[in-house]
Image (spheres, rainbow, N blue to C red):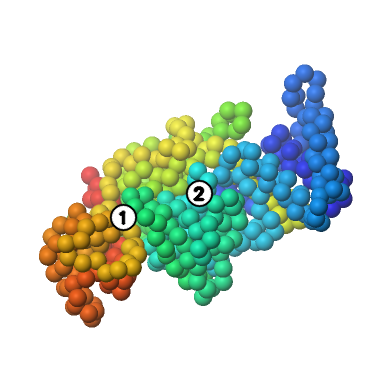
Amino acid sequence: MKLRKLHIVLLFILALAIGLAGGYTGVKLAQKTTPPTEQSMKLGGETTANEAITQDMEKVDQAFRLIKENYLEDIDDKQLTEGAIQGMLSTLEDPYSSYMDAETMKKFNEQIESSFEGIGAEVNKVDDVLSIVAPVKDSPAEKAGLRPNDQVLKVDGKSLEGLSQNESVAKIRGEKGTEVELTIRRAGVAEPFKVTIVRDTIPQETVYSKTKNVDGKKTGILEVTNFSERTAQEFNEQLTKMEDDGIEGLVIDVRGNPGGLLNVIEDILKQFVPEDMPYLQVEDQKGNKTPYYSDLKEKKKYPISVIIDEGSASASEILAVAMKEMGYDVVGQPSFGKGTIQQAVPLGDESTIKLTFFKWLSPKGKWIHEKGVQPTINQKQPEYYYTSPVEIKEPLKQDQTGDKIKNIQVMLQGLDYDPGRTDGYFSIETKQAVISFQQDNDLPTSGEIDAQTAKLIETQVIKSIRDGKDDKQLDKALEEVYK
C-alpha cells in the first residue's frame, strides 16, 4: 500500500470517532450500513477536526515509513495497516469494538444469516479471557455441555493468552466433522477441564414453539435462541399460529440467547409494547436520548412471562427489560449485561470496523450495562445443572474424598441415583449408586468411578438438561404466568 493511501485509510478511521453519522445499528452488528461522514467539529481553540487529525497523522506516516524502510525483515504493507487499525481499537478498551478482515467478515455474515460451521457458541473477551456468552441451541457446543461464563483457556493445547478475540475465534472455528479440544475454566470448579467438540453445521432455526396445558389453560412457549435476519418473521409466524389455536398465556424463553440484530428485536417488541410507551431508548455520545415507539394500540389480552439467565445478552435483554417495565414477570437469573450498540462500517476492501456508537436504554431510561436485567422472580436450576465434566486419571474409590467425587455425586443425584450424600466423601451409599448406574448402562459393576463411567454419567446429565428435565425456571414461569 502506498504511504498516501495508508494516510487516507487511517484518516477515515479516525473520522469515525469524531463524526458519528450513519445508518441504523445492530446490537450485535448490522452490516448493511453507510460509512459515517466526517463532520467539522471544534476540538479546542481554533483547531478543526481535520487539522488535528492531520497533525496526528504525521506521526503515523513517520512510524510507517520508519518501519517500512528500516526494519530488519521485510514486512507487508497490509500487515502494518491492519496492525494500526487494531492498535487504535485496542486503546478504546471496549470488547465490542473490533476490526474484521475480509475472511472474518465473511464468517460473521454467515453467522448473522444463521448458516455457518463451527462449534456454535457466542463468545466475548472478558478481562482478557475468551468467555462463552452462550452456546447455540442444538449446536456442538451445547451438546458438549458448554455453559455461559465458561472461560476458554486453550485450543488444542495451545494457550489463547495474548491473542485478540478474532484470533482466538479463528482457532476454534473449523470445517464440519473436524475436532477441536478446548480447555475450560468454570466458576466453582477447582481445576480446568478439557472438552473435545466435533464441529458441525450450526442450526439455522432460531425460534422453537410448543404449547402446554397449565391448569386447564393452553399456554404457548416461544424459545428464541438468537436474533438473526429471519428471527422476527419466524417469531411472528409461530406466535400468530398459537394465537389462532387459542392460547391463553405465553412464555418467552430467551435463556442462553446472546443477542443479535437490533432491527429484529424491534420488530418483535412492536408486537407487545403499545404506542403509549417506548419499547427502547437510544443514547448517543452527547447524552441525547431518542425513544422509539410502536403503533400498537393495546397490550396482548393474555398474560406473559419471560425467562432469562446469565447467557441472555444484548437483544435478549432489550426484550426482557421492556417486558419487565410493562409489568410482566421475568423469571430466572440476572442476565449478562450488555447495554451498547455496535455498527459495522465497511472499509472498501471487504474488511469492516465494528464500533460502539450508542447506549441502549430501557423504556424507562435505565442502562443495564455490566449489571444485567434483574428478574422479578429469582429461580435457579437444580444443582446438577451446574456440574462440570470430570477428568479421571485413576479410578475414584470408596472412602476417598474430593471435589471430583462431590461433582459426580451431584450428577448421580440428578439422574435419580441416590449417592447418600453430596459432600465429596465416597461413602458405601455412593458406591451402591455407582453400581446401580453401571448395571443400568451395561458397564462393569466395579463400584468405582473410572473414566468410562464418569463420561457416561456426564453424557446423561447433558442429555437430561437438553431435554428439559427438572427445568425449574420454565416450571416457575408457567406457574407464575396466570397469577
Residue 176, image x, y percentages: 53, 73
| Image point (30%, 57%), residue name | 387
Q: Mark 2 is on which residue type?
A: Val
**Which of the two labelled residues, at mark 2 and mark 1, occupies the earlier sequence position?**
2
From the image, tell me which residue sits under label 1. Answer: 386
Marks 2 and 1 sit apart, C-alpha to C-alpha, by 21 Å
Viewer-nearest residue: 312 or 400: 400
Q: In the picture provided, is 390 more to the left or to the right than 107?
A: left
Residue 39 vs 156, above or below: the answer is: above
Task: Please indicate, yes or no, whether residue 142 appears anywhere in the rendered image.
Answer: no
Viewer-nearest residue: 157 or 370: 157
Query: Tag 2, which secondary structure?
Result: strand
Q: Mark 1 is on which residue type?
A: Tyr
Q: Crowding at label 1, few (<14), some or many (≥20) Cα neighbours within 10 Å?
A: some
Viewer-nearest residue: 358 or 45: 45
Query: Tag 1, which secondary structure?
Result: helix
Q: In the picture provided, is 260 more to the left or to the right than 300?
A: right
Residue 194, image x, y percentages: 42, 63
| Image point (22%, 80%), residue name | 444
